[in-house]
Image (cartoon, rainbow, N blue to C red):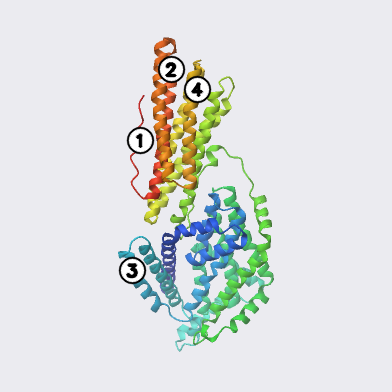
Amino acid sequence: MDTLAFILKILGSLGVFLYGMKVMSEGIQRTAGDGMRRVMATMTHNRFTGILTGLAITSIIQSSSATTVMVVSFVNAGLLTLIESIGVIMGANLGTTLTAWIIALVGKFSLSDVAIPIIGIGLPLFFVGRNRWKSFGEVLIGFGLLFYGLYLLKESVPDVKGMLTSADAAAQAQAQQIQQFISAFSGKGYVSIFVFLILGILLTLIVQSSSAAMAITVTLAIQGWIGFEESAAIVLGENIGTTVTAWLASIGTSVNAKRAARAHFFFNVIGVCWMLAAFYPFTQAVQWLGEHLPESFRGKDHSAAIGFHLAIFHSLFNFTNILVLVPFVNQLAALVTRLVKETGSTPATSHRLRFISGGMVDLGELNIPEAENSTRDLAGITREMFLGYLEIFKNPDLDLSEEVKRLKALEDAADVLTHDITEYLVRTSAAEISQDNARSVTRMLRIVSELEEISDAIYRLLQITQRKYTKGRAFGDEANANVIAFADKILELIDLYSDVLATGATEAKLRQAEAIEQTTDKLRKQYNKRAVKRMTETPDAVKTEMITIDMNNQFELITNYGLNVVQSAYYLLKHDEVPEPRAATGS
């Protein structure tokens, strides 16, 4: 029963720590999510700024796993290149070492006296504050819970050193049993190092957080369960284990996202390999540095020394690994490019969107750029479909059956992508995202729905054109010219809403879209009247002119949906109500 109680205490303490990290990270995303996205997108254009970006973001959100999953997501969305992602991953590895320093402080003094007041400050902000203040309160609560979890973890793990000097014979016997168990795996040179390295990998895989694994490792070391070399070997294993999160996140993503995950794996594995070769000299150097720390860094009984030794080891190892491998970023990118090859894909599969989860830390705020990127992809599909339709309409004498199949595949791809984006946005909104981003999700759902309607209308145009050819209905010069003139205005609107989705909406663009829609409404009425007139003049042309009217009506539908896209994007920025969708106009 004592063993069960011990395990439950450890799990409970770890749960408080992980929940605190989750709450703090998600609060930071809501407080500074837009800024983090901008930094990630604009500050990573060379490997050195990428390293600084990864270092800063991981130090803030206290989760290298969240940062690397974010990197995979951004690469998948095309917001980061493979080379840029490698720099960010290097910086994330260094940023996560801050966790070891924080945990080492727990061995120096009790943080419970600080953690509870921090939670006390954050609680009123969380309940009374609004928007960013509410999120900031959440950050403080998470920060306090994180430190309180570390305090509980330390209190839950028996102090082996203290037990050995205890007057209680039972406590001494228990401490000796622990030492004997650990010593069975220690003192065997590299065999022991490999055993503890594998233990570090397994520990990280189980808890799915290198920060949590580091918390356990440092706590065990401070409490005298394991020595410095064994702890250092576990830390190396944790560096490998943490790459699995990004690897799993890359399943089903783009080729470049898979390559970014593999680059993370190889960067860490290569670092561990050279560290194993220099393990004993390196650890001796670290201990020498630790012994020369200022006396203020140590507890009264120097019990915190090993914690600081591990923090130095973790930081110095990752920093040295960056110095060693940063000149070889291009070679690392070439290696993963050779290992993860491009694969052929159909339009229906090449536009798939996959929700990427951060595991312990929800990336709801930072998932939105990928949804925005896929929405632009959907707009690109509608443009490609419309251009394909025009090609078929203008060349009735050519066999374009393959082009028809391609356009049908694009329409299928639009349906699939619409489903993916909708599901993605719903899952994103399930997280506690900020009001601004919640509004963005709502508007994006509206835009995606309108774009899907446009793709359906274009496909109906294609079917009408096929019926025209199979029935042998030839348009006259006037009808052909009318279709081309109408199509030019629609293409103008498609280009406009594509530009709006790429660069943002302005009032001038909204007015331009409204003017195009008013023009096309007049054209539909005008061209349909001409078609009716041609019917009365030539009764045999009734079926042909009905096809003309069908085309004009589909054109008008497209412009209505296109205007809705621009309106939704504009009012998204203005935080106003989007007008009701324009109803389909009858003939």
Q: Alpha-carbon distance for marks 1 and 3?
A: 46 Å
- Image position, residue 447 (x, y; %): 42, 42
- Image position, residue 496 (x, y; %): 47, 39
Of the residues tagged 1 and 4, which is closer to the observer? 4
Q: Alpha-carbon distance for marks 3 and 2?
A: 70 Å
Tag 1 secondary structure:
loop
Q: Identify the amino acid type marked 3.
A: Leu
Taking the image as shown, residue 318 lies to the left or right of residue 564, namely: right
Q: Identify the amino acid type marked 1.
A: Arg
Q: Residues within 10 Å of mark 1 (few under 14, many from 20)?
A: few
In this view, the residue in front, 471 or 152, is 471
Tag 3 secondary structure:
helix
Q: Which residue is at 41% across, 40% downward?
A: 511
Q: Identify the amino acid type marked 2.
A: Glu
Q: Which residue is at 45% across, 51% downward?
A: 368
Q: Residues within 10 Å of mark 4 (few under 14, many from 20)?
A: few
Q: Alpha-carbon distance for marks 1 and 4?
A: 27 Å
Quarter assignment of residue 277: bottom right
Question: Considering only order in the chain, which callout, 2 or 3, is on the residue closer to the N terminus?
Answer: 3
Tag 1 residue = 582
Quarter assignment of residue 115: bottom left
Asked if disc 4 and disc 2 are in contact, CB closer than 8 Å, the reply is: no
Residue 545 shows which numbered tag?
2
Q: Identify the amino acid type marked 4.
A: Ala
Above/below status of 450 relative to 101: above
Q: Which residue is at 59% across, 48% downward?
A: 255
Tag 3 residue = 123
Above/below status of 137 relative to 178: above
Question: Considering only order in the chain, which callout, 4 or 1, is on the residue closer to the N terminus?
Answer: 4
Tag 4 residue = 481
Q: Alpha-carbon distance for marks 4 and 2?
A: 14 Å
Q: Alpha-carbon distance for marks 3 and 4?
A: 68 Å
